[in-house]
Image (spheres, rainbow, N blue to C red):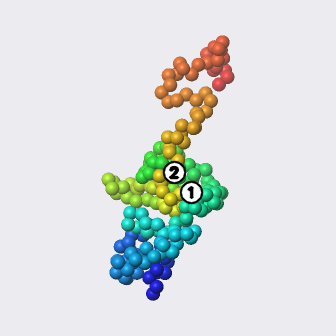
């Protein structure tokens, strides 16, 4: 068995970061040989469309950053065609609040999100794991596949949440929570009876 070919196949089918320990176990070869094969593979793929990246001791396949623009355009179009507005909204919440519970997602959206979260899980865009403080609760976070859909290499490349929300203006006439009722004024010259009749 060619060790480089075996490692490459494992990383391809895994679709996630694979710890070095798992690669050693799967290949059945000494750690030093696996590390050497990984370095050779990374060197051979340095200028190809698919790279082998190392993240915190784990290895994964990813698209070349030089192709990120075209990959991002292609996958963003595909993502929008196949995901509903509810799914995109939920995915955005998970992205910026992760790790987040289903209850927190539903508190923000104001609707039951069980089906939408399940749909995103099936698409491989999010994953869940038990909460370290309460085993009855699951935590949701985005996956590496989600980053690939956006053509990104790291979560640090995502737009800053504060910058995004700063550009969003409230609807005309919107009164922020906590605004005293007297601040929402009636039209000049209108009586309370007029307003009741209009409503």
Q: Residue at x 50, y 45 (%)?
A: 160
Residue at the far bottom in the pictured view: 1
Q: Are marks 2 and 1 in contact (CB under 8 Å)?
A: yes
Q: Residues within 10 Å of mark 1 (few under 14, many from 20)?
A: many
Gap between marks 2 and 1 measured at Cα: 9 Å
Left/right placement of residue 18 relative to residue 117 reads left
Image position of 33 with respect to 90: above or below: below
Q: Picture coordinates of residue 81 (x, y %)?
A: 65, 57
Point out residue 173 in the picture as x, y percentages from the top left corner: 61, 27
In this rendering, the answer to whether 194 lies above or below 136 is above
Foreground residue, 143 or 39?
39
Q: Is residue 102 left or right of residue 133?
A: right
Query: In percent of the image, x 52 and y 70: which residue is there?
Result: 46
Q: Position of residue 166 (x, y in %)?
A: 54, 37
Instruction: Report the front residue among 87 and 96.
Output: 96
Furthest residue in direction left, as rendered: 133
Q: In the rendered view, tell whether residue 35 sits above or below residue 72.
A: below
Q: Nearer the viewer, residue 196 or 37?
A: 37
Residue with the mark numbered 1: 150
Q: Which residue is mark 2?
A: 158
Expressed as whole percent of the image width and height from the top left, the position of residue 33 reads 37, 80
Q: Residue at x 54, y 42 (%)?
A: 164
Query: Mark 2 or 1 closer to N-term?
Result: 1
- Can the viewer see residue 145 in this picture? yes
């Amino acid at each position: 068995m060619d060790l480089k070919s075996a490692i490459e196949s494992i990383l391809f089918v895994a679709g996630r970061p694979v710890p070095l320990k798992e690669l050693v176990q799967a290949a059945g070869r000494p750690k030093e040989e696996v590390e050497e094969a990984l370095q050779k593979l990374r060197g051979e793929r340095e200028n190809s469309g698919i790279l082998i990246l190392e993240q915190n001791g784990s290895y994964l396949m990813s698209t070349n950053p030089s192709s990120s623009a075209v990959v991002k355009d292609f996958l963003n179009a595909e993502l929008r065609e196949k995901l509903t507005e509810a799914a995109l909204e939920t995915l955005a919440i998970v992205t910026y609040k992760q790790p987040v519970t289903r209850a927190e997602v539903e508190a923000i959206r104001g609707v039951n999100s069980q089906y939408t979260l399940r749909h995103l899980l099936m698409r491989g865009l999010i994953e869940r794991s038990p909460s370290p403080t309460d085993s009855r609760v699951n935590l949701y976070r985005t996956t590496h596949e989600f980053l690939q859909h956006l053509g990104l290499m790291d979560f640090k490349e995502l737009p800053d949440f504060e910058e995004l929300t700063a550009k969003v203006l409230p609807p005309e006439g919107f009164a922020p929570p906590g605004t005293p009722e007297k601040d929402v004024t009636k039209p000049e010259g209108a009586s309370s009876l007029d307003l009741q009749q209009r409503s």
